[in-house]
Image (cartoon, coloured by chain):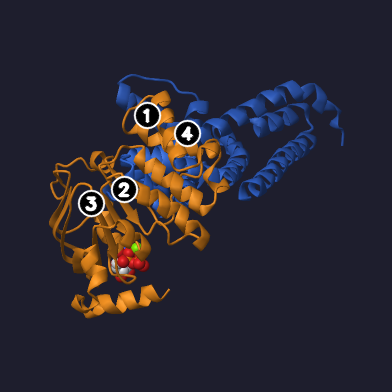
Chain colours: A orange, B blue
Amino acid sequence: MISIQNVYKWYGDFQVLSNCSTEVSKGEVVVVCGPSGSGKSTLIKCVNALEPFQRGDIVVDGISLADPKTNLPKLRSRVGMVFQHFELFPHLSITENLTIAQIKVLGRGKDEATEKGLALLERVGLKAHAHKYPGQLSGGQQQRVAIARALAMDPVVMLFDEPTSALDPEMVNEVLDVMVQLAQEGMTMMCVTHEMGFARKVADRVIFMDQGQIVEDCAKEAFFGDLSARSERARQFLAKILQH
Amino acid sequence: MDFSAILPALPGLWEGMLTTLQLMLLGVLGGVLLGTLLAVMRLSHNRLLANLAATYVNYFRSIPLLLVITWFYFAVPFLLRAITGEDTPVGAFTSCVVAFLMFEAAYFCEIVRAGIQSIPKGQMGAAQALGMTHGQCMRLIILPQAFRKMTPLLLQQSIILFQDTSLVYAVGLMDFLNAARSRGDIIGQPHEFLIFAGLVYFTVSFAASLLVKRLQKRLAV
Ligand SMILES: Nc1ncnc2c1ncn2[C@@H]1O[C@H](COP(=O)(O)OP(=O)(O)OP(=O)(O)O)[C@@H](O)[C@H]1O
Ligand SMILES: [Mg+2]
């Protein structure tokens, strides 16, 4: 579903990604973790071409991002993305947030889009808030709306960039529950997160990044099972976050 | 001082006020449209477009409005003749509207640009991630939010234009000030009419400013 092939990226002279390669197959859930500044957000943003890269290629559902002929907006419409700071559109109601891209990008009719949006809103447990504006919802509620908004586009894969790290602790679980459910339904997911409980529960694989490189890329059981087989950096990192 | 002559002159003064308001309204509407286009150009990644817009803005911000008005009075008919190939008479009113909208666009551009830049970057990312094109992101997501934030500044600039429209006396257009002045001259009471005109400008501008301040407070919440 996603194939990342020897991707390099620089910001000016600064190398953010260095020879990153990995695969995410259909239905797989891959968790990406690593210290701050290691390039996790950059890598995941490269997958839907929100960030350009200079070398290598990423192929999503058979479409190459490095190919200059690729219609990037069209590709992005099939890749769902959830951001750390939700990024709901504050000038639009919840319903409009859920329908605007369905209508303007996919060309769906207003009734069809609204029906779909409301069904997804119900699924994330927020149907009663359809007429409100984003500013009237709590962080956890906003993030669940953001997930529903991405799902409304019928994505073939979902990307998450630290979806719970801007939330108050008591709201983390309501968002994780939605993500767990999604994973169990077979959605292909690539999640940057430090929620190791989530990784343990639903991840198939865990990727550990450091200084722009993919240092570890292994099955969940191996990642959490045999610490002695992990790299020094990964062990230090795990020790730090598992303390919390 | 005898203000009694003003009452019978009111219908004529009102005509002048209508011209003033029309000039302002058309100047603001056209200026905001062109200014928004310039702002989007200035922020685009296309160097050529960005430089073109920047040159335009810097040029019009560096010359006096009075010059633009007189210049367009002569240039617009000339340009039209060059384009259409025949004499197309345009009145002072049209050439003034063109002058105002082109001049104000430079100022509106900077207001709109600041407004666009004040929208968090993640909004653009989220809109793009949903598959919107750059144009859709701007039109549906960024500009509506930016305009909401900019409304007080845009109105403030419009109030300034309301006063600046009086410069059209240079090309003989009968705006409110010109109407008051000429009527006062004819009747032989120029001072009374100018004082009255001053009061009207002050009242309208000051009241509008107060409204803008209240709006600003409302939007800030
Ligand atoms: N626009 C930019 N220009 C220059 N450098 C950048 C830019 N964006 C990110 N960087 C740098 O690239 C590196 C990787 O950033 P990235 O956001 O991908 O890290 P991250 O692993 O997501 O970190 P965090 O856990 O803090 O979110 C960082 O060192 C960051 O400072
Ligand atoms: Mg990040």
Give me the disc on residue B25.
Answer: none
Q: Residues within 10 Å of mark 3 (few under 14, many from 20)?
A: many
Q: Which subunit holds the residue at mark 4?
A: B
Query: Which residue is labeled 3 in the image?
Result: A28
Query: Which residue is labeled 1 in the image?
Result: B78
Can I make out residue B63 in this image?
no
Whole-percent x, y for residue B88 in the image:
39, 20
Discs 1 and 3 share one subunit: no
Nearest-to-viewer mark from 1 and 4: 4
Do callouts 2 and 1 mark residues in contact (Cβ within 8 Å)? no
Q: Residues within 10 Å of mark 4 (few under 14, many from 20)?
A: some
Give me the disc on residue B30.
Answer: 4
Between the C-alphas of marks 1 and 3, the distance is: 69 Å
- Left or right: residue A172 versus residue A194 is right
Nearest-to-viewer mark from 2 and 4: 2
Label 3 sits on a secondary structure element that is loop
